[in-house]
Amino acid sequence: MSVPQFYPWQVETAREWLGAQQRERFAHAWLIHGLAGIGKVEFARAAAAALLCESPQGGLACGVCSACTWYGSGNHPDFRRIRPEAVALAEGVLEDALDGDMEEPAEAGKAASKRAPSKEIRIEQIRSVESWVNTGTHRGGLRVVVLYPAETLNTISANGLLKVLEEPPPHTVFLLVSDAPDRLLPTLVSRCRRLPLATPPANVALPWLEARGVKDAAAQLAAVGGAPVAAARRIEADLPVRADWLDTLAQALARGQAPDTGALVDTLDKVPAPEWIDALQRWCTDLALLQAGAPVRYFPSLAEPLARVAARASRHAVADMARWLTRQRMIATHPLNAKLFAHDAMLRVTAACLKAA
Ligand SMILES: [Zn+2]
């Protein structure tokens, strides 16, 4: 198994970041942030490999030393990743076929059989890493913890992590990854150096998608706000460019009719809430653009029904809807009742879009 690589749009940033600093002076905690779906977790994992590598080349992992071999086989004793059980399980489905896991997939599985897998990073995970970082490193170099998504730390685990970072353990680098750093505990953020990752320009993202055999790459990329990894995942998972539910919703509203809310809610119940909220936010942006006389940005294939929706909907109601979605996005990782939440959202969209201008 080879060590994880940086995506082409990350290599320059990685070289500047990793190559310019001496390992022993490397800051002990970093917050890697940027748009969802641009490959931030992959960046952190490739960075971990580089930091653990025993003979880095221009800051990046050499791929052949013993540390790289250990890392590549999923067995480096000085590497840990922390993510919610639900994320670990979702990754396991993909990774089991591809490579080994770095730690305790069996434990995550066992826990999950007793109760629903946690969507949060739990304090037990932080405590386990805390005792681990307080022992010597196995290979005498750095020890690296990759934690994602950092916004899934709950109040207790975030405070637990803060305590660890306040007295940074020696030779240890924490790489926190987040789509939404504004949702993190500010005191935790203040303990980290920030490393913003840019969304790659289309002239880099499109050839990358095309090289993977993606047809209609420009439309795929637009539908996910320019995030190439998100676009590639949708295609690998055989998901259409835009979800069918958006099409159903747009077609009904374009005819001036309320959509079949029950059927839409059943569909949304199977999609992670942040994902459908993001899609609806882009949808609202497209409506607002049309209402301002501009072309759509995200859903060119829905331009025609959206134009009819935009002509009918009140601008005020669309703006209200967009604000409501932004607020919901803040809490979307833990809706109390996902179905009720989706139902509420569908009713609000319908009301906003059928309200006379
Ligand atoms: Zn190496």
Image (cartoon, rainbow, N blue to C red):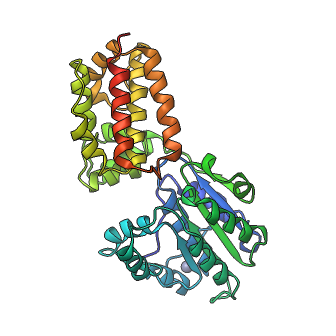
Q: Is residue 250 above or below residue 96?
A: above
Q: Is residue 216 above or below residue 99?
A: above
Relative placement, left or right, of 248 versus 146 is left
Image spot of residue 216 (x, y percent): 26, 40
Quarter holding the N terminus?
Answer: bottom left
Picture residue at 38% right of the left edge, 76% below the top: 114
The quadrant of the rendering that contains the C terminus is top left
Residue 140 appears left or right of 197 = right
Q: In the image, what residue occupies the spot 28% across and 16% down?
A: 308
- Residue 30 at least partly seen: yes
* Observer-nearest of 133 and 37: 133
Q: Quadrant of ligand 1?
A: bottom right
Task: Relative to 250, say whether 354 is above or below.
Answer: above
Locate residue 2, reporting x and y percent: 42, 76
In which quarter of the view is residue 286 placed? top left
Measured as percent of width and height from the top left, residue 299 is found at: 33, 31
Q: How many marks?
A: 0
**Image height of 173 relative to 209, above or below:** below
Residue 224 on image: x %, y % = 39, 41
225 or 265: nearer the viewer: 265
Query: Splitting the image into 4 quarters, where does residue 265 fall?
Result: top left
Tell me if I can see residue 22 in this picture: no
Q: Nearer the viewer, residue 190 or 152?
A: 152
Tell me what residue is drawn at x 32 percent, y 68 percent: 94
- Image point 63% across, 52% down: which residue? 184
Q: Nearer the viewer, residue 102 or 1?
A: 102
